[in-house]
Amino acid sequence: MDLAAKAGWYYYINGDTQDAIARKLQVSRQAAQRLVALAVSEKLIKFRLDHPIAECVALTEALRDRFRLDYADVTPDDGPDVRHGLGVAAAAYLEQLLASQAPIVLGFGTGRTLRAAVEELTPINRPQHRILSLVGNMTGDGRASPFDVAVRLADRTGAQCYPMPTPVVAGSIAEKELLLTQRSVETVRNLATQAKAFVVGVGQVCWNAPIQADGFLDEAEVGELLDAGAVGELISWPFDADGAWIKSGIVDRLMGTRPQAPPASPTIAVAGGPDKTQAIRAALHGGLLTGLITDKATAETLLKGA
């Protein structure tokens, strides 16, 4: 036991390799390995993670338990703009998905935070995968979205890209029905049923929110959604404070793939910050998500209000 304690100290405190420990204790490398394992099994070594990430790990587990999530990740606060930290964490999650050698289909929302995640992604060659956009990639007047994720992700991975070649909101029901008959749109919608996972943002519905500021909804349309009780949107589909889908004339003209509730495939949201807390909470309460990547302050607020 004395030898095990020494081996544990050398390994965990002094940072020695097992070869170095073997030399110092004058035992074989295999014996040094067994002594280190014995120190742990006999609880001679007690671990304490003295780092801000320790609190994030605890919050991660609390979120997972409280909202019955399959996946959660909480990042340390990163100043007034949490987008960079969320991007790093989301990139790590994406790299796990993309590591698959077997061909997979992945569906993506759009937005600034997801765009930040793609920028943090280590380039990888995965031509066998298919990346698709779950939401239209242009405004009603034909202007392209500057925050489209699918195209940029395909550039970094060599994956096959399937953008949604429509506006976010069709100008009329007749226009929507016509667009739905297009082969390219039908292909994207069919691929969505095969997706291994969806990675999305959570947007707030309020005056001058990104969905309005970026030109996807005009002032009258935002007002209509607010009057209907909308607090947030998931790939453009609005929901109320209970996480229930909103019914309105605008919703009838949405072109994107409507999320399922509860989700049939893993649906991971990457979202944080005080402006989005109400929308994130509503999405969680409505069972619209199976996973969440968020920041420490948002996680604390979500748990306090739960």
Image: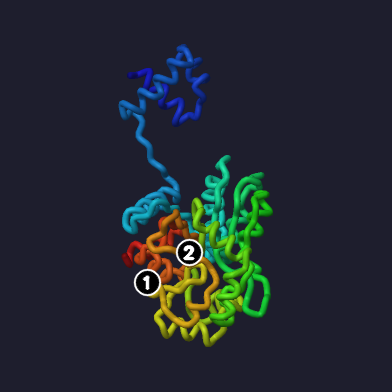
Q: Residue at x 39, y 20 (%)?
A: 35
Tell me if residue 124 can be seen.
Answer: no
What label sits on residue 227 in the rendered view? none
On the image, the x and y values in percent for residue 172 come to: 56, 82
Give the residue number, with chain letter if any, for mark 1.
244
Q: Are marks 2 and 1 in contact (CB under 8 Å)?
A: no
Placement of the N terminus among the 4 image quadrants: top left
Tell me if residue 232 can be seen.
Answer: yes
On the image, the x and y values in percent for residue 9 come to: 42, 27
Q: Residues within 10 Å of mark 1 (few under 14, many from 20)?
A: some
Residue 68 falls left or right of residue 277: left
Q: Residue at x 37, y 21 (%)?
A: 4
Relative to residue 244, is residue 2 depicted above or below?
A: above
Q: Residue at x 47, y 85 (%)?
A: 224
Give the residue number, with chain letter if any, for mark 2.
272
Q: Quadrant of residue 182?
A: bottom right
Residue 15 falls left or right of residue 264: right
